[in-house]
Amino acid sequence: MTRGSRAALVAASLACLTAPSVVQADEKASCMAAHERGQEVRLANHWVEARRLFLVCAQASCPALVVQDCTRWELELGPHIPSVVVSAKRADGSDVDDVSLAIDGTTVGRPLPVVPIPLDPGEHVLRFEHAGWPAVETRVTLHDGEHDRRVDVRLEPPAADSTRVSERSRRAPTGAYVATSIGAAAAIASIVFLVVGKIAEHNLAASSCGHAGTCSDAQVSPIRTDYIVSGVTAGVAVIAVGLGIWQFQF
């Protein structure tokens, strides 16, 4: 074996001997940090985070005195941490699937958790969201030891149909009513010109030139004009009424 090979072998052996102690030192440092930080956040009423840290420093790999402290603190704190149980339903009482929940701006889960959610005491904002539906927010104030507080919300799809009906009703007076009014006036005008033309035609036919068939174009032309105007106004009436009906529907 060469001198370089022997040196490499010695270095590898030393690394194997020192690695466990390095790992143990890191674990001990994590335990001590969790022990210290857990006490700080507990005093600040961040009990959920404090309990998580106490569980970290209560592991068997931590120093015995630290494990003793953290185990006791976790057991003492557990019964005091409040919790909520959430649900989202429709008006008919059926469950809404695929609802996401955010608490104080942080997403907790999607779909909704079915188990109690531990929270710190104090006020919290719960926001329930379902894709395409209006979100619902609610506030709750939790107290020391208040477990399984029910938070039930109602979610409904947007009322798109009723919105369209409301918009149609707002548009109708300026659109549909005007169009139908024009159509009605045009229809009356068409009838008036038709009646006037018929009367004039009857009178002309009963006259001497009508019997002799010698009426001039000047005598016949007004009657022809009445019929033309009657036909045009009848067409306007049909178009206007049709437009008004269309606006009522859409």
Image (spheres, rainbow, N blue to C red):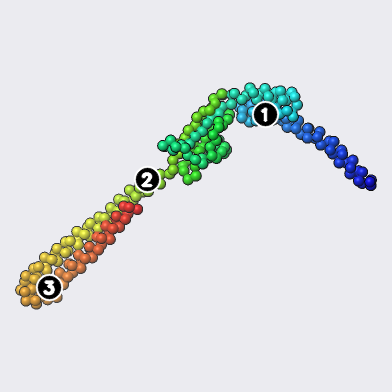
> Pointer 1: residues within 10 angstroms few (<14), some, or many (20+)?
many
Per the image, the residue denoted by label 1 is 55
User: Distance from label 2 to label 3 (Cα)?
Assistant: 60 Å
Which of the marked residues, 1 or 2, is nearer the chain's N terminus? 1
Q: Amino acid at mark 1?
A: Leu
Which of pointers 2 and 3 indicates the residue nearer the eye?
2
Using the rendered view, name the quadrant where residue 49 is placed: top right
Give the image location of residue 201, x and y in percent: 11, 69
Question: What residue is rendered at 51% in x and 41% in y?
Answer: 98
Which of the marked residues, 3 or 1, is nearer the chain's N terminus? 1
Asked whether, in this view, residue 98 is left or right of residue 225, the answer is right
Does 39 appear above or below 9?
A: above
Q: Secondary structure at mark 2?
A: helix
Per the image, the residue denoted by label 3 is 219
**Residue 162: mark:** 2
**Residue 101: mark:** none
Viewer can see residue 85:
yes
Q: Secondary structure at mark 3?
A: helix
**Contact between labelled residues 2 and 1, with CB atoms less than 8 Å apart:** no
Question: What residue is rendered at 22% in x and 58% in y?
Answer: 185
